[in-house]
Amino acid sequence: MKLFATIACVVFSSLAMAQTSSINAFSPYTMYGVGEINTPGTLAMRSMGGVGVAARQVGMINLLNPAGMSLVSRKSMLLNVELEGQNYYNYQTVAGAEKKSAYNSFNIRQFALQMPLGKGLGVGLSVAPYSSVGYRMMYDHEYDPMDPVWGNVGRVNYSYQGEGDVTEVKLALGYELFKNFSIGAALQYYWGDIDRTYVMTPVSITGNGSYSSIVGESEYGISRVKAQFGVQWNAILTSRRILTLGATYDLGGDLKPSVSNTIAGDATVQDDQGTLPLSLPKQLTVGAFYQNARWSLGLDYTFQGWGDNEYVENTGSNSTQAPMQVAYTDTHTIKAGVEFVPARFDARRFWRRWSYRAGLRYGSFCQTYNQEKLHEMAVTVGLGVPLKFRGVSAIDVGFEYGRRGFNVDEAAGLVRQQYFKFAVGFKLFGGAENHEYWFMRPKYD
């Protein structure tokens, strides 16, 4: 127990530092709000497109539905640690010219553990990134002699930069209320820092003018508690097949961050970098999960209600360009996934005990640009390699390819984005397979 506590403290500390010390996303679409929402769930779930609100398996930590915590082996403990690398590629056509950018990142993805509290009662604790902000953009306001202000100065360079993360710490409790029906609740603590910087640099056309740069910075500190509720019902439960239905509801609302705005320069100016309020959506997810000896099939639908639209004007526009309007919008996402295990108990052929996973996710981004919705899609594949015969411990590998903005990039002049993600997860089970019995009082000293 002392060794386990030490490992948990180290992982928690490393994960907390990792989520706030580097850019974990690279997208201009993270310029507003809380940024890019990460797909929740363990790597096994994300490799199946992100499904899992109805998933119910021994030896699997269900981070999507707290009701799943009720299915936990007695006298055991389950630990999950994951690492993830990402590659972002952005493409845009501006005035007939192609603009491209790319960025790579690598970080600890999440940490989770699950343990029993009693018969049909389990608890889980996890730390994972909820959203990420990361962008670096530049814009040149070309010299216009007819401009009443900049016509006497020259060209002006604008630079926008932002980074930060919102991390979710989740404490979930699941209980089997009666046979085949479980309920659950979770407390979700969100914390993090988001920094956004705006720099304006005038460039004199005569060469002898002297103008100071203006630097504006906004810092957001987040520390809020929310809640999630879930249910699961085994509609079919036999020795050959299982069909489970599940649903969750997440409370949304304003994150109410502490905000610090500063502007530095020789003159008093107004920082025109608008921002959307930092808030979380109300979320409803329903799904079904079917299992037999070889196959597992899942289907989820998620609705996120971001509330009333609040428009802001995007900076970087000149007199010949209309300002960009950005607003929150409700989203609908469909997730589908499959897992295939040729023979779970094949003692001779190791590779037949592997889990082969694939999935698909399709939906839309939570913001509109000039009332244009951005579609999102992702294709996932994964592999689970068991560490012991008839055991639960395993090494998971997952790969995801996604796209965003492909439906309106040319018509609206927006950025077309694609990304690749590669992750490795370690699922460690402390129980009968390792001749370990947790939470059991010894009979002999």
Image (cartoon, rainbow, N blue to C red):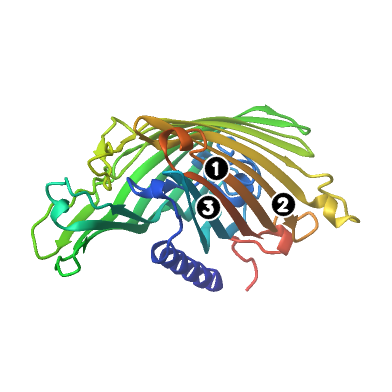
Query: Marks 3 and 1: which is nearer the front?
Result: 3
Taking the image as shown, residue 268 lies to the left or right of residue 323, namely left
Classify the position of the N terminus by image quarter. bottom right
Which comes sooner in the sequence, label 2 or label 1?
A: 2
Q: Where in the figure is residue 326, as x and y percent of width and height?
A: 31, 37
Up-down relation of residue 371 to residue 265 (above or below): above
Q: Is residue 179 visible?
A: no
Q: Where in the figure is residue 381, as x and y percent of width and height?
A: 68, 46
Q: Which residue is mark 1?
A: 403
- Residue sitting farthest toward the right: 348
- Residue sitting farthest toward the top: 235
Classify the position of the C terminus by image quarter. bottom right
Q: Which residue is mark 3?
A: 89
Q: Where in the figure is residue 181, as x and y percent of width and height?
A: 56, 31
Q: Which residue is mark 2?
A: 383
Which comes sooner in the sequence, label 3 or label 2?
A: 3
Taking the image as shown, residue 239 lies to the left or right of residue 314, namely right
Give the alpha-carbon distance from disc 3 to disc 1, as whole Å: 10 Å
Quarter location, residue 378: top right
Give the alpha-carbon distance from disc 2 to disc 1, as whole Å: 22 Å
Q: Give the residue type that dot 3 points to.
A: Tyr
Q: Residue at x 69, y 34 (%)?
A: 297
Q: Give the residue type that dot 2 points to.
A: Leu
Query: Marks 3 and 2: which is nearer the front?
Result: 3
Q: Is residue 274 visible?
A: yes
CB under 8 Å between callouts 3 and 1? no
Q: Residues within 10 Å of mark 1 (few under 14, many from 20)?
A: many
